[in-house]
Image (spheres, rainbow, N blue to C red):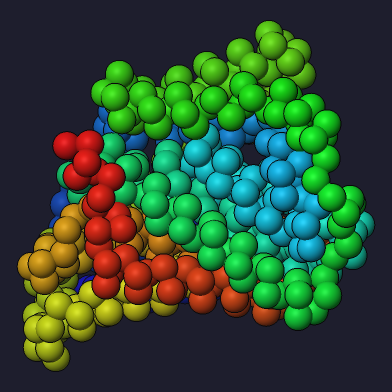
Amino acid sequence: MILLLFLAFFVLLILGVPVGIALGVSSIIVILWEGMVPLVLFPQKMFVSMNSFTLLAIPFFMLTGVIMDKSGLTQRLVNFADSIIGWTKGGMSYVSVTSGMMMGGISGSAPADTAALSSVMTPSMVKLGYPARFAAALQAASGSIGIIIPPSIPMVVLGGIAGISVGKLFLGGIIPGILIGVLFMVASRIICSRNNYGETKSNSFSGSYFIDSLKKAILPLFAPIIIVGGILTGVFTPTESSVIAVVYTLVLGIFIYKSIKLRDLPSIFMEAIISSGNVMLIIAASSLFSWILVSHNFPQTLSSLITSVSDSPFFIILVINLIFIVGGMFIEGLALLIMFVPILLPIALAAGMDPVVFGVMIVINIAIGTLTPPVGVCLFVACSAAGVKLDHAMKSAIPFVLVLCFALILIVVFPSIVTVIPNLIE
């Protein structure tokens, strides 16, 4: 039955069926084939999987991302980053990464961050002589940081299904997210220098431009400080922080900058509802898929298979990463997370891995999946905005994928990179 489940799922994916529907239909096929349970269990299982206070953060973080894009907050952050490092050689690539890190501290959605960055950065980079394929790959990579630096929608989902503190996951992602951002800048510097990419808009730092852009970006810059700071101090939970993010960005957009009109709100809400609906469908259908795997003892079978080859913790962690890296090429990140985290978490814990380190490791794997076809959602979004072919951008994205893989190795070898801040707060 497990073979039938995966076969039906991949056939539906090949036929172009959306991931959430493919998960649900393949699960229903297996249940009907076996006559396992009454049909009424389908909606019950799916509803229970979504009926979580923790998961309530998802639509609010989605809404925050849309508000940032429509209100021009993204442009303000980009201009601020540009004023600091945009004048250096290859500076626009640094601006993209820095902007992605700042936006990641507000919205928590990699595709949303990529879309916003692509609309602002790609035209500017192409105008300054950067190849469109490199610009697209860079925006996709910069957007992927958004799910590593808190807040993060995958961390919210992972914490909800695995029973890991979402707050600790958020804190654990701070240093790895910053580290990856710095490594992305180093990779960009090497690429731009070797290929002589890009001109600079100015040959020197402009104090007046910096002060002007800082004035315009100061309030948006407070958003991640409020969100992460509130969680650190215990003023509000990660879920409550998502509501704070919406209220704060709405106040900025409507009352402070007046860039959002009341008539714009229905379209903003609708865009967020559609995005959230897609995510929640994947969560609901994935839970049904995962329940079938568990009911057929797939976790025990997989665990026995892995440990029969070797019980070395290094080997076990390597296999877990390979499952997510390869799986992320074909399955959307949240679906993959819900399908396999309940199965692989006990194996990782038995190998001596800290649950927070495991969670951050999985999220980095998901970030890799956003850059690797055929499913790489961030790469698709960036290529669509840049008007370039996916295979061309993929070649330019390879260095950034390698950076993420290097970051995986670092946190496995040096887990304190993840645990130092959560332990300090405790």
Identify which residue is drawn at 39% across, 47% down: 174
Residue 395 coordinates in the image, percent (x, y): 67, 79
Residue 276 coordinates in the image, percent (x, y): 50, 37
Of 396 and 179, nearer the camera is 179
> Quick check: can you spot residue 30?
no
Residue found at the far bottom of this picture: 309
Q: Is 277 placed above or below 161 here?
A: above
Q: Is 165 placed above or below 249 here?
A: below
Q: Is 28 placed above or below 56 here?
A: below
Of 407 and 327, nearer the camera is 407
Left or right of 301? Residue 284 is: right
Left or right of 405? Residue 247 is: right
Quadrant occupied by the N terminus: bottom left
Which of the 4 image quarters holds residue 99?
top right
Identify which residue is drawn at 31% across, 21% down: 236
Residue 88 coordinates in the image, percent (x, y): 78, 57
> Quick check: can you spot residue 344?
yes
Identify which residue is drawn at 80% across, 45% down: 205
Residue 105 coordinates in the image, percent (x, y): 50, 39
Which of the 4 image quarters holds residue 300?
bottom left
Quadrant occupied by the C terminus: top left
Left or right of 359? Residue 62 is: right
Left or right of 239? Residue 295 is: left
Identify which residue is drawn at 41% across, 61% down: 364
